[in-house]
Amino acid sequence: MNLGKFQRKLLERTRRRRLAFFLTIDIGSIIVAVVLAFLLRFEGTIPSQYFQGGLQAAIVLVLISVVPVLLLSRLYSFTWAYVSLEDLLLLGRALALSALITGALFVLLRSQEFFLGFPRSVLLITYVLLFLFMAGLRLSKRAYLQWSAARKQGIGKERTLIVGARDEGEEILRSMLQSQKSAYVPLGFVDTHLSRVGATIHGVRILGTVDDLVRIIPEYGVQTLVIALPEHASADIRKAVELGRKAGLQNIQIVPPLSELIGGQISIRELRGVQVEDLMGREQVSLDAQTIKQFVADKKILVTGAAGSIGAELCRQIARFSPASLILVDQDETGMFWIARELRARFPQAPLESFVADITDEQKMRSILSRYKPEIIFHAAAYKHVPLMEEQVDEAVKNNVFGAFAIASLAVEQGTEKFVFISTDKAVNPKSVMGATKRLGEMICQMLNGKDHTKFVSVRFGNVLDSRGSVIPIFREQIRRGGPVTVTHPDMRRYFMSTPEACLLVLQAAAIGEGGEVFVLDMGKPVKILDLAKEMIRLSGYEPDKDIPIVFTGPRPGEKFFEDVLSAEEGTEATKHEKIFVAKLSSVEEQKLREGLELLREKVSVDDREAILLALKSIVPNYD
């Protein structure tokens, strides 16, 4: 017998024993409930005539009504340690159905001798008692575990204060109380509303408001602060962090936004340290998950640039919606190894294929597309670093223009249903080579849209927080080294969005796109890079310009002070999603564009930098 068969046999034996144990307890509960119902009905003494058959018949009648219904309702499949309100409602429905069966059988059998003069109220009392017994037994293990955890307070666990007594706080408290392995002992809550102070949630008291943290933390010996506030409550999050630090706390954890949570479930496993994006105050994005699911579920989906920040997050979000298969393509072998490893661990049910490949290798890409026939392609592969691409103009054009053109043309050739081009706000009135190449990618998608039946859509957005090589990891490394933190100019501003938020909006835009659109995401308010640097320094426990100096280095080649999401000539049209708009762009002349691309290809082949730049300017409107 191999190991797999042995494990299955052992598991099946354990399940049978478990079923027999709980079924025996429920049968005992039925017998006790019927006897007690008689005692209650007759004020403590069961009349002797019911010992002649009525009592026994009632027990049998209830048994044959209840046991089959419990088995069919799968009430023995859940774990008693985690019994929930939904489980108790299921129990109630099962017993209500059993009561109807009992009533029907009683009507059929009431002429029998042992039911003559039988009080029907006994059956009603029986089912009330039965629900109380069965619900109580099912809650008993959970209650015991919570009581046991309460007894162990302070023994090797962190004395924890939760900030936020709303849904997020209640869920994180429940996770702490239910987990035997929890490292947290909840001492109490603080909230943003004075009116809630003094109330209790699952027996844990709301001790004060956020303003009281400096008093409460030393008074209760708090070791860990867990912030469970809505994503948009950045002012309260910032205040909690500042007051926690002021009170001497080093361990401050936060419940991430729902967009970062797999399945949207809040638990202690998801807690992480506070990051700068938690303090930026973006409103939580509402998404039409059903539309995204219909778009993604059971589809073969290919993502290029799958090892990059955007590509990897797209893969994570796509995997949540049950694609038929997910094909990853990237030339970064190390990045590909880690994202494929992560996805297989987190989404074992998602069929996954990964390829280390260069998108400009047309033969290789044709082989992948012809083999897997993806129905949707997300093209996220691109060179994105503005100053570097100013130096490597030929490589920027090869990858961002001709790589995109090759993949888009193969999508048409292989019958892909939808091609989604990941663009950037730097494509608007481009000042950099990178921005110009991305605008040219948009134009290629506009040109190819409608060829055969492939629909092309582009999605523009600004900077994503904490992406590789972006300003946040650079600042973090500079702070770790003790400074200085380098900012190009005090007036430099950028739009920012978290990577999960951006990718979910990309999926939403792709789902509603009908072909030919360039979607623009609402990036909120622009952020001053100087303010971001100061916030990160404070978040690390230092004071800007006192502990960590800030140095201005001057704008880099191709860099704007402010990025637009639309040019002056472009307007927008609303979509059914409040955060997604369609840019009104002029149409693309196919013949002119193809001629321009041929000229560009010729100049790239001889690596003539100035000629490449002139060719780009002749093709891309407003490229300066």
Image (spheres, helix red, strand yellow):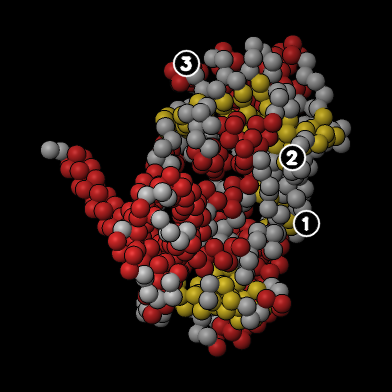
Q: Nearer the viewer, residue 470 or 484?
A: 470
Q: Is residue 279 above or below residue 598?
A: below
Q: Earlier in the sequence, mark 3 or mark 2?
A: 3
Query: Which image quarter: residue 421?
Result: top right
Residue 368: x, y in percent? 45, 21
- What residue is shown at x 68% (from left), y 69% (from top)? 236
Which residue is painted at 47% across and 16% down in the image? 370
Which amino acid, by three-letter code, is at mark 1? Asp
- Considering every residue shown, the one lying at the far bottom of the view is 219
Q: Is residue 275 above or below residue 215?
A: above
Q: Inspect the image, locate mark 3, and give the three-letter code of the amino acid beneath it.
A: Ser
According to the picture, the residue beneath numbered tag 3 turns out to be 370
Q: Would residue 80 appear left or right of 302 to someone viewing this image?
A: left
Which is more N-terminal, label 2 or label 1?
A: 1
Q: In the orientation shown, which residue stands out farthest toward the right?
A: 569
Report whether 581 appears left or right of 456: right
Other residues around mark 2 within 10 Å, as few (<14) / some (14–19) / many (≥20): some
Is residue 157 in sight in this rendering?
no
Image coordinates for residue 24, horizontal then vertical, percent:
28, 58
Distance from disc 1 to disc 2, alpha carbons, whole Å, reads 32 Å
Q: Amino acid at mark 2?
A: His
Q: Residue at x 67, y 76 (%)?
A: 196
Q: Which residue is mark 1?
A: 491
Q: Which mark is residue 155?
A: none
